[in-house]
Amino acid sequence: MAQNKTTENDLSVTDFLNTVTDETKRKDCFSLSDIIAETTGFKAKMWGTAIVGFGSYHYKYESGREGDAPLVGFSPRKDAIALYFSSEFKNREQLLAKFGKHKTAKACVYVKKMSDIDVEVLKEMVTNSVARISSLYP
């Protein structure tokens, strides 16, 4: 079975975030890292070369595929910052409705800048997502 490419490693989160060329996005990523670390109690760690993750869990699918993933994370992308949450968590739709300017995919929420979102709603989404994943993968 193929090895997962996105694994926790010892690369520097600070060094990675300092490579973000857009100054606003770079500052937002440092702020986001602090908020998520404070909310979860987990230290920011690099996952692969471009994901900042917090905490970890081990998953195993019915297909037999298994691995480790961050409980919550984010990645600065060209067009937006991708936030990685559980695809289902308590009050997801209600929280997203109050979150501010964003786009969604299955488990990702994309934001352009921190000033577009409600940080208190972000904290609740982080907490609820971590609780959901922790209940599925104790």
Image (cartoon, rainbow, N blue to C red):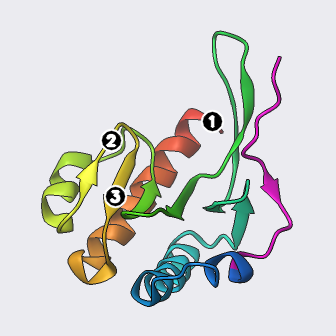
Q: Secondary structure at mark 1?
A: loop
User: Local crowd at mark 2 within 10 Å, few (<14), some, or many (≥20)?
Assistant: few
Task: Please state, as top left, top right, bottom left or bottom right, where the N terminus lies in the image.
Answer: top right
Residue assigned mark 2: 105
Task: Please state, as top left, top right, bottom left or bottom right, where the C terminus lies in the image.
Answer: top right
**What's the amino acid at mark 1?**
Tyr
Return the x and y of residue 113 as percentages of the image width and height.
32, 77
Q: Nearer the viewer, mark 1 or mark 3?
A: 3
Residue at (56% x, 69% y) in the render: 40
Specify the segment rendered in magenta.
Answer: 1-13
Q: Quadrant of residue 47?
A: bottom right
Work out whether residue 99 or residue 21 is closer to the camera in this orientation and state it.
21
135 w.r.t. 73: above or below: above
In primary-sequence order, the first of circles 1 and 3 is 3
Residue assigned mark 3: 110
**What's the amino acid at mark 3?**
Tyr
